[in-house]
Image: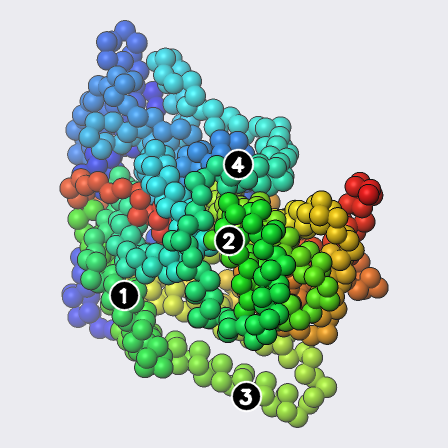
Amino acid sequence: MINGLYLDGKSSKRHSASLEVNFSEPVPVTIVVHYDDGQQKKIALTLAEMKVQSRIGSTPREIMFGDGKLFVTESHQAVDDLVAMLGGSKSLGIMHKLESSLSMVLAAIVITLLVLWFTIDVGIPTSAKYIAYNLPSFTSKHFGSSLDLLDKTMFDPSELDESRQQHIQKLVAPYLKQYKNLNAQLKFRSSDSANAFALPDGNIVFTDDIVNMVETDQQLLAILFHEIGHLEHRHIMRRALQGSMVTVLVVFITGDIDNLDLMTGLPTLLLDLNYSKEFELEADYFSLELLHSNNFDLDSFATVMQRLDDYYKEGGQGDVVAETDIVDNGEDTDKHINETIKTVVGFLSSHPATYDRIALVEEFKKNNPR
Amino acid sequence: MDSSSQIVEPTVTHKKAGFEFRGDGMEYFKIWIVNVLLTILTLGIYSAWATVRNNRYFYSNLYLDNTNFSYLAEPLTILKGRVIAVVVFVAFSMISQYDPAYGIVLTVILLIAIPYFVNQSLAFQRRMSAYNNIQFRFKASYFEAFMVFYVWPLLGVLTLGILYPLAMLKMHQYVVKNSAYGTTSFDFNATYGDYGIIFLILLGVGLVFGSIYMAIVAFIPGAAFITPFIMGLVYFGLYLYFVTQINNLFFHSLSLKDHRFNASVSAVGLGKVVLINLLLILVTLGLYLPAAKVRMAKYFCDCISMKIAGSLDDFTAAEKENVSALGEEFGQVFDFS
């Protein structure tokens, strides 16, 4: 016999009740309700008619039956035994068993951390890459409006000489032609900083400042190739996909999107920046490969990176105008600054540090000797 | 008092019943970590079951007058709503990042839909909550939700804050008066003045500290380095004062038939809980999160009580109705509830 309470689901009045089992009866379970006035009511039930809630912590156990009726008891073991004897679901108590076992909980902590690490490091990037390459091409005119929007908000028409523009367009034309499938085009715009970026519709934008900053045609091509690399590797789409996946992951862990904005927002931001850095290095590598295959000087890439770095150190404005801008002022290459500060700054930057990018050039040279 | 007062004394006896949270940090940590593990291993599908288990833990451990609340939602209902919401969210953020112009159009559509989804969300939450086997209810019009979420706050801003307390009052009225326990509606009797005073005190204290700050900056330049720290503390203090006062006012103004509520959350008490939680979460790299939630729940429950007129035995259930979890899931994914 299990003692508990009975509620009929129509009124909030509680009645003391007991649950009795008699296996010789065809309907083995009887709930006996004891009313305050001394009257009794008996309700006979089969297991199929009862919905036994799984155990959670040490909270009262609920058995629902009929149309919204409820039997509540604190006798957890008796309820588990009853369900087992009646041949009910064996999985009912499994969650509580998992949660009560210390070794299970320790294992859960370790496995959770490992799986999280793997998901972030491999799972999300790989699946985003797969999706980005297998989506139908969106590089149509429908998405052409993003440059229009930037023109209205961030940019003015370019102030470069017509002849200078024509010279550059002639210079880049053969390379853009190779990436016709990406609809790659070069556009010039004026803004308050040296910047270059690629939009998903294939538009590559150079600001006047960045054009004025480069010294040679090869340096300019190095930047262009980097931006083509962003297009070729579908970085904007992949970053958007990965951002969505990280958000979903954080929601899973915290249970809900609740008020802990700092606790959930900070890891999301750090992961996004980390992914961004990987994309930049991928685009850098793409640029080096193109320079190499066209027999250009790889140092032009390293030089232009260093020049950009110097430009920003001198206080150039580095607005982050798009996902794939080539530089921003969040990075710092001063080798003398404290390692810790360097690490923190590195974490909080969307782009790799310049010395890492230059190191990539050296490594590339070693692996691809002329 | 003379004996005549005893004659008019009502026949119902009043008793004070406290809210009580009987959960335990360690116990909840175990439930939470197993939930997180299974959620990740199942690529998120288990999250619906995890949510139900989390909510059941918090509802079932919440006691009023020695009886616990219940959470009734089925994981599959939550899962359905969640799948739809996540698909829409992913599409939304992808399109927005791909082309900001489309993002703006989608945002406008979303803004128009928000009042509807908040109504749905509250209806689902209430219906999935029960006490003594009687479910709660929520039913509000789109128009009222629209007024509460957009029009009143906008008027508050346009009047430079003068009508902002009214916007808050309207919001609380919307939440409370549209809610019911079974067939019995909740009532709310706060006034514009009740809210106004809290805002005025906040403004006054803010001005005093603001001028002290200006004075220090102007006259003691050497102390300037410490002032941001002090201002941070003042801001935190004002925030706690505001949250606790609004919370207490809310419960003082709330009633269910002749039953009334009382709350005595204090800025110092809440501040202690928030700081201890924050510190322990940081030190444990987030593993303290579940225990922090338990501590917070315990603190609030300790401060809130109900003044029961007679007994809570005579409430009756409302007719059955179905509300989908979609509204709630939308609200959570887009963070507007």
- Residue A243 location (% of width, % of height): 52, 49
Please identify, in this view, whether the residue under mark 2 or under mark 4 is nearer the observer: 2
Counting residues from the start of the chain, the first of labels 3 and 1 encountered is 1
Alpha-carbon distance for marks 2 and 4? 20 Å
Q: The residue tagged with tag 4: helix, strand or loop?
A: helix
Secondary structure beneath dot 2 equals: loop
Q: Which of A6/A348 is in front? A: A348
**Cα distance in 3D space between marks 3 and 1:** 34 Å
Task: Find disc 4 in the rendering and name its residue.
Answer: A130
Residue identifier under label 2: A202
Q: Residue at x 51, y 53 (%)?
A: A202
Residue farthest along the bottom direction in this orientation: B219
Q: What SS does tag 1 mark?
A: helix
Disc nearest the viewer among 4 and 3: 4
* Helix, strand or loop for disc 3: helix
Q: Quadrant of the C terminus of chain B?
A: bottom left
Which amino acid, by three-letter code, is at mark 2?
Gly
- Circles 2 and 1: CB distance less than 8 Å? no
What's the chain of the residue with tag 1? B
The reply to whether dot 2 and dot 4 touch (C-beta < 8 Å) is: no
What amino acid is labelled 3 in the image? Ser
- Do callouts 3 and 2 point to residues on the same chain? no
Check if mark 3's residue and mark 1's residue have beta carbons within 8 Å. Answer: no
- In front of the other: A91 or A189: A189
Chain for numbered disc 3: B
The circle drawn on residue B148 is 1
Q: Is residue B206 left or right of residue B120?
A: right
Q: CA distance from mark 4 to mark 3?
A: 58 Å
Q: Nearer the viewer, mark 3 or mark 1?
A: 1
Same subunit, labels 2 and 4: the answer reads yes
